[in-house]
Amino acid sequence: MLHHVPDIAADRVLLVGLGKAAEFSAKAFLDALRAGVTALQKSSCKDAALYLTDLAVKDRDDAWKIRQSVLCAAESVYRCDQLKSKPAEAPVLRKLLLGCADKPSATAQQALDQTQAVANGMALTKTLGNLPGNICTPGYLAAKALALGKAHKSIKTTVLEEKDMQKLGMGSLLSVTRGSEQPAKLITLEYHGAGKKQKPVVLVGKGITFDTGGISLKPGAEMDEMKYDMCGAASVLGTMQAIAEMGLKLNVVGVIPTCENMPSGRATKPGDIVTSMSGQTIEILNTDAEGRLILCDALTYSKKFDPDTVIDIATLTGACVIALGHVASGLFSNDDSLAQELLAAGEQAHDRAWQLPLWDDYQPLLDSNFADMQNIGGRAGGTITAACFLARFTKDYRWAHLDIAGTAWKSGKEKGATGRPVPLLAQYLINRAKN
């Protein structure tokens, strides 16, 4: 940090090292951006102009650099300390000007405006994820969805109760909530940004507000992080808010099945057989494989919207974390063009996914002697067999599945929700609206 530099209007100038020019890449740009914004937040400055966006980054345009700058700035000011008796003081930095050597294009301005909406959606997603299970219950998520509908005229919110789900035959979803005192909810948010004739994109988010594993009880270590098992639902709410703020000319529906997975005298037991909304029967061998049990009924329910495309988002399997770590989300699809669209959107947003196989060769692992299928396929290929299970309920439309178990939150010292994959989903919807 340099002070009172001659012939410079600013009081201070912050220099950021970029490394070797020949090795400057998108990752180096992001590292420099984070370092610069972090240093600004630690200083006492209230206003700053950022000129890193003028740097040339291989295979990245100005819109990408602007998007990453906005998201980095938003991340630096995000706090989730509202439950502390003495919340931290608000960051001093209030205004960040993105400096441009040339007059910014309309595309650059649009990227700025859209990314501010995405950042707001990510903040909602992170806050919901970080809230403890005793506050963020299925009823709390339903109230947040209803509030979104009130705040945006383009969104219509509906909440179904357990008696409604029973009438619809959602035996699979209801089997998960049996052990809980908190009533399950099925939330739908309908965003109307285009004509009625346009078929919608349906986003289905897993909303397990706390997952003990049920009778197949999880180990106690780090079980507190199972409050994040509703991050799929939170990402749907965040994405719906973002597209409403953007005013995208697109029809989008959010479907959120939400409940707790708790052990009790009424809880579903390993070996129980239930009937899903589709009529297919499921032998539940492990009650901790519950996400797919609520998603399968929500995916069947999604057919009522006559969708063009359905994408489900879920913190589904620990096996996905083993396969891909905390960098990429797992992606499966029954349509290769849809998979490519999502992969491209992830690259644009730097919220990347990696496609895994959905081959029929894996399906026999779900065979049951007593029902149409069992809810687990063994340890080998656990992420894939979970997706194969969901695929049995999605044969009537284009479908993709995002397993965000490794990307939805961070553990350890930096524990907290990440807001992913809101950037990926928002970029995918922005691209669709353009086309």
Image (cartoon, rainbow, N blue to C red):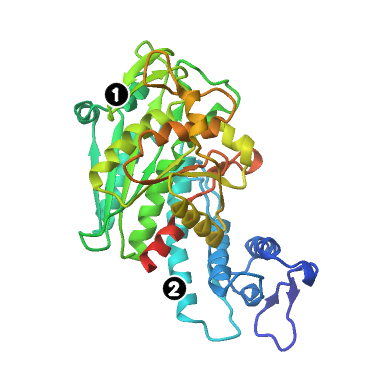
Residue density around tag 2, few if under 14, some if 14–19, many if 20 or more, within 10 Å: some
Question: Where residue 218 is drawn, which disc sits there?
Answer: none
Quarter of the N terminus within the rendering: bottom right
Identify the image quadrant of residue 263.
top left
- As helix, strand or loop, the secondary structure at mark 2 comes to helix
Relative height, residue 58 to residue 387 (above, below): below
Query: Residue 229, image x and y in percent?
Result: 47, 35
Relative height, residue 27 to residue 15 (above, below): above
Query: Residue 150, image x and y in percent?
Result: 25, 53
Quarter of the C terminus within the rendering: bottom left
Residue beneath label 2, please?
110
Q: Residue at x 55, y 42 (%)?
A: 356
Q: Residue furthest bottom?
A: 7
Q: Residue at x 71, y 72 (%)?
A: 14
Q: Residue furthest front?
A: 361
Give the spatial CA distance, label 1 vs label 2.
45 Å
Does 304 sit left or right of 336 as displayed?
Answer: left
Identify the image quadrant of residue 210.
top left
Q: Amino acid at mark 2?
A: Gln
Q: Amino acid at mark 1?
A: Gly
Query: Residue 131, image x and y in percent?
Result: 46, 39
Residue beneath label 1, please?
171
Does 40 sit left or right of 425 as displayed?
Answer: right
Query: Residue 7, image x and y in percent?
Result: 71, 89
Q: Residue at x 38, y 33 (%)?
A: 392
Whether the residues at callouts 1 and 2 have beta carbons within 8 Å, the answer is no
Query: Which sits earlier in the primary sequence, circle 1 or circle 2?
Result: 2
Q: Residue at x 63, y 35 (%)?
A: 322
Residue density around tag 1, few if under 14, some if 14–19, many if 20 or more, within 10 Å: many
Residue 207 shows up from this direction? no
| Foreground residue among 127 and 318 | 318
